Image (cartoon, rainbow, N blue to C red):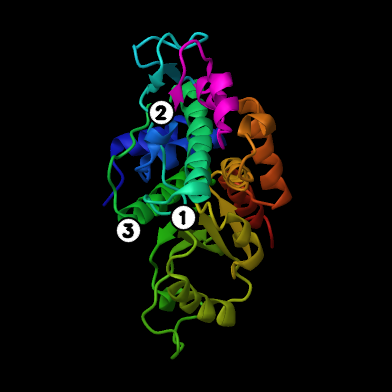
Amino acid sequence: MPLSDVQKALIDQHLGDHEAISAVIMGLCWNESALANSANIEVSQTETLAEACERLGLGWNPAWLTDAGFTAYDSAGTALDPAAHAAGPITWIPELRTCRLDDNVSDMAKGQGLRRRTSAELAVLAVWSHVVTSRNIQVLRPAKQSGGTRGALFRDLLIYFLERSLPDGWQVRHEVPLTHIRGLHMRRDVGDRKSDILIIDSGHRLVAALSSKWTWRSDRGTEAAQMVPLTRYRPDVPYAMATAEFPRAASVTRESIEDRTYHLCPGWAGAWMSVNELPAGVPARDRWPDLASLKREGMSRAEALTLNGLEVLVNDLKNSGDIL
């Protein structure tokens, strides 16, 4: 399905701001989690959020959410400013809607698995919401969306983002038959396979082939089948991948068969990994007392893993166009 005018406008409005582009694309491809109510913790009367965090030894820090613009209310409907006026579960305004990022932990998980998944989801919600709020991004998050639909939308948003970011005269083409690529034409072993995304410069040179993967686990066999003829007959063309993978993000840079990989939101993936790996019994507040410290940790982790964002992809493609 073609992108809507609203979806295109969101990309156009935030070109040049890579965090905003990450927030737009993630919001439009949102994978609703069933565990958002895990943040409705029980507080005692006169207890502050910091005290509740200390008592419960949370794997996430309520300060991340308050720093991102969320407000906690006690069971009487009064804001915890600074303490609860009534005991019971708290609620958050705006409503918390976390994104499911870990397919390895089920909705019925208990113990440390549940702690890890919900804490990491809340961490990413906080950093995403902070960008959306600070940039006043009017992005819509679907309540339900199938995995296949999400992957196709990610690809189409990526294509449009590249079309708007690359120089005039460049083309970003999707599902081009491999037999239409010079060097692969008239080859008997190419068959009827198609490319995912091809980048062509203003001189009609094939700059790169790009695979889009919302999650890294899907279609690896299909992708390998596409790469074999390309690498055999056009070894001069780099093969890259763009993904929004979280649980396997660290593996992408080590094990991916592509020449280079790029991530939708490297710093957020780094924050997700750090929170997800927090040992049982260790309060997140002790490690990351506020949202700023969590974001710094995420960027540090991403840099250590050489997770590069979509803005690096654009620069690499532009630089490829200058190579003779």
Q: Secondary structure at mark 3?
A: helix
Q: Residue at x 69, y 45 (%)?
A: 301
Residue type at mark 3 is Gly
Mark 1, residue position: 171
Q: Residue at x 46, y 27 (%)?
A: 132
- Estimate the x, y position of residue 137 in percent, counting from the top left: 42, 26
Q: CA distance from mark 2 to mark 3?
A: 31 Å
Labels 2 & 3 near each other (Cβ < 8 A):
no
Between label 1 and label 2, give the one nearer the viewer.
2
Q: Which mark is residue 40?
A: 2
Q: Which label was assigned to residue 232?
A: none
Q: Which residue is more in the foreground, 24 or 274?
A: 274
- Give, as a three-letter code, the residue at label 2: Asn
Residue 132, above or below 313: above
Image quadrant assignment for residue 201: bottom right
**At numbered mark 2, what does the secondary structure look like: helix, strand or loop?**
loop
Q: Residue at x 44, y 17 (%)?
A: 71
Question: Which residues lie in the magenta part?
Answer: 40-68
Sooner in the amino-acid sequence: mark 2 or mark 3: 2
**Image marks 3 and 1: residues in contact by CB distance under 8 Å:** no
| Mark 1 crowdedness (10 Å alpha carbons): few <14, some 14-19, many ≥20 | many
Residue kind at label 1, given as amino acid type: Gln
The residue most toward the bottom is 188
The mark nearer the N terminus, 1 or 2, is: 2
